[in-house]
Amino acid sequence: MDRTIRIQLKPTHEQKQLLDETTRQFTQVFNAVCAYGWQHSEKNGVRLHHATYYDLREAYPRLNANVLIQARIKATEALKSAFDRKAKGRKAGQPQSRQCPIRYNERTSVLNWQTQEVCLSTVEGRILVPFQVPPYSSKYAGYQVTTADLCIRNERYWLHVVVSVPEPDVPQSDEVIGVDLGLNRPAVTSNRHFLGSRHWKEVERRRFRLRRKLQSKGTKSAKRHLKKLSGRSLRFHRDCDHVLSKRIVEHATPGSTLVIENLTHIRSTSKIRKKTETSRRLHSWSFAQFHTFLSYKAQERGMQVVKIDPRHTSQTCSQCGHQARNNRRSQSVFHCRSCGYQLNADLNAAYNIRDKFCLAQGGTSVLSGPLSDGLSSHASV
């Protein structure tokens, strides 16, 4: 399995100039291939290579040939994504980048974990740049490097290194854990763990009020503040997704199966009223990023993450199977109209998610049974 390490480079002033110039030419090649592919409706990598390679080699003779090919490969990936969006009727335009990260492979970069130095190809040949591995990524240091992307942000140079890590030797378990994701409670599992923090919602509210005030002000300083606030919010959501996915994996048995709802098109299918706080939080919900974090964390412990259809999971009684919209009395209370079974609504949904997957696999539904403490006895993390 592959893992990405984000390490910071420590180049000298002269090395920074070389890396900046190499990035500039790499970006120009990327944009040139994207422009050709978009104008000629071409997304095939081989045909794009034959149509653009020799002209670009002549226009950028100082750029390493393999680095130039990596720019074409990145442009091909961007074109395929854009054409796929266009075919689905979604908004799509010609891919273009102001600063495209350079992609290095084993032919254009050599990373030495012992000396903590990396050899990179530039427009003036190869340079040797020292780097520093952060403590939280040190467990991946020493593994074989497959590719690396050079990212320049705020005059800092980062190398996103992809390493190949062996699969974990974990015995498989028959346990299936349903996970209900929500806006009020970030995650509730069928093994009765209420995960996430109520504080996260208040942080979002406070930042929304500040952002609204700055937008109404409209001054230059307010716009600068808004830009800083945007990056801060993205980092906050990323941290929340990391913490939540880590807690879910920690509270599950290694080798088990985690079942979550498929929320791919929830923004377009949701019936939540527009211009409300719930609608605003729904549109800022980074569930795709969360799924990515949960998948790779679960993989390290031999777990599998699967998605199921989320329809009716919050309306169905996990005890008798009766489905009705009025079964859910409020956001937090589920009370079945048929059998009178009552428990926390999110916990009931987690049971249904687990049972739905078990039935789809041809097994028997795992009923929760009466829980007299269903509303109170749970772990909050």
Image: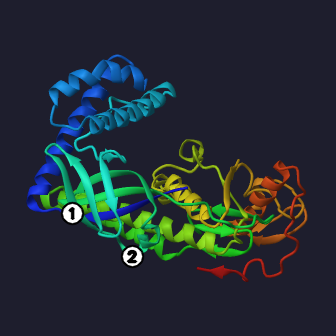
**Whole-percent x and y of residue 152?**
23, 54
Residue 195 in the figure: left or right of residue 7: right
Q: Quadrant of residue 236?
A: bottom left
Mark 1–mark 2 distance (CA, rounded to whole Å) = 31 Å
Residue occupying image coordinates x 87% and y 68%? 340
- Furthest residue in direction left, as rendered: 14
Q: Amino acid at mark 1?
A: His
Q: Nearer the viewer, residue 315 or 44?
A: 44
Q: Amino acid at mark 2?
A: Pro
Q: Quadrant of the C terminus?
A: bottom right
- Give the residue number, with chain letter if any, for mark 2: 135
Residue 221 in the figure: left or right of residue 36: left
Q: Nearer the viewer, residue 223 or 16?
A: 16
Can you say whether 139 is above or below 224 in the image? Answer: below
Q: Earlier in the sequence, mark 1 or mark 2?
A: 2
Q: Confirm whether residue 214 shows in the render.
A: no
Crowdedness near tag 1: few (<14), some (14–19) or many (≥20) residues, C-alpha within 10 Å: some
Residue occupying image coordinates x 13% and y 56%? 15
Which type of secondary structure does the marked residue at label 2 adopt?
helix
Q: Quadrant of the N terminus?
A: bottom right
Q: Confirm whether residue 158 shows in the render.
A: yes
Q: Quadrant of residue 192?
A: bottom right
Residue 133 in the figure: left or right of residue 187: left
- Give the residue number, with chain letter if any, for mark 1: 225
Residue 74 in the figure: left or right of residue 321: left
Q: Quadrant of residue 303?
A: bottom right
Can you say whether 185 is above or below 261 in the image? Answer: below
Residue occupying image coordinates x 74% and y 51%? 312
